[in-house]
Amino acid sequence: MTAQARPQQLQNMLQQCLSLPQLTSSDLPLFRQQMRAGFQHYSTPLNAVFLGAQAATPGMAFLSGYQNAIRCLDKTCPVNELAAFCVSEKGVKKPWDMQTRLLAEADGYRLSGQKGYVMLMPDHLDRLYIIAKDEADQLKCVVLSSTATGLEASEALNAPFVQDIPHAGISLDQVEISTAQLLKIDGHQQANKPFRYWEDVHVSLSVMAWMVRESLNDGQSLEDLDELTRLMCQLIEKFEEQPDYYSAESFPLLDECQELLERHSEMLKPESLEQWKKDRLLLQMGQKIRHLVRAKLAR
């Protein structure tokens, strides 16, 4: 698709989504259905828009972008499965300090440790991608089923945002891992590090699509929202040019996303505005991390 044709495609998609049921955390089977349908027709950025435009809340928009970011990590992740990328550990700020360990055995590996925030645990998740340290203190990425023996839900890290999406911590006790479950990538350079970028782009697109739907439902026209749709097209184009990590051009685009969302949020209805004020904290946290990354790349 040409860059010239994309704005019209995007506007058509957003308009069509108005007639679709809104996706809520109380009806995750419908979310799975729409996610699967989207993956069959769209790239991950466009699918983030497609699902975000159906989201009933900013939290569901975040989930929409997040599931698409997962497919950048693992393109073989089944289109009907809900997955989570698990890095955070209580009290641990740097990936190299994490305590989750992957130890080699004669017939494979054993995975032990804890992760503090796993979206959709314990009842709705299908698979987990877990970052752990091996015996050489190198970060690895392991994929396993949410029903694996030795994996249990535990108390989650407290989070003041996206509270409509269920989550929990996890405890891993000598979980058996086969060689096939170990992704053949560097767990930091090709998983942990770029996931921040993938999540940034796809969540921004989903949340902007949610904002467009809310605004259209409040009586605004697509012409009134031209800034949002234009920026969505630019972000998709930049991601297609450089899908692996941030570029110098992606930083100002993502910052502009934040600014436009704040500006348009001023016109939301009271209930939607209240929810937005809570859930935007997640985007603001991401913005702070992004600025740190930008500073490092500028050195």
Image: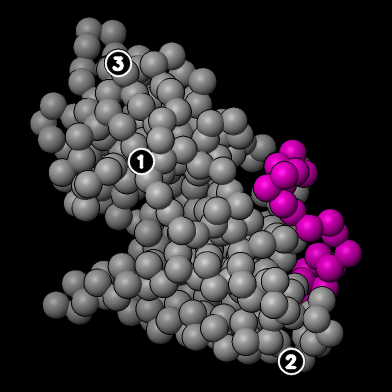
Q: Where is residue 158 in the image (x, y as percent from the top left)?
A: 40, 49
Q: Give the main secondary structure of the magenta stretch.
A: helix
Q: Position of residue 116 (x, y in %)?
A: 36, 41
Q: Is residue 134 above or below residue 66?
A: above
Tell me the SS state at disc 2: loop
Residue occupying the point 51% across, 20% down: 147
Q: What residue type is labelled 3?
A: Gln
Task: Kindly indicate the quadrant of the structure image that contains residue 184.
Answer: top left
Residue indicated by mark 1 = 116
| Magenta stretch, residue numbers | 6-31
Q: Say if mark 1 contacts mark 3, CB within 8 Å.
A: no
Is residue 50 rendered to the left or right of residue 197? right
Q: Distance between the residues labelled 2 and 3?
A: 55 Å
Is residue 174 rendered to the left or right of residue 124? left
Label 2 vs label 1, nearer the camera: 1
Residue indicated by mark 3 = 174
Q: How far apart are marks 1 and 3 (CA)?
A: 18 Å
Q: Is residue 132 above or below residue 295?
A: above
Q: How far apart are marks 2 and 1 (CA)?
A: 41 Å
Q: Few, some or many C-alpha atoms within 10 Å of disc 2 (few <14, some 14-19, many ≥20)? A: few
Q: Is residue 6 visible?
A: no
Q: Which comes before the other along the chain, label 1 or label 3?
A: 1
Q: Is residue 135 visible?
A: yes
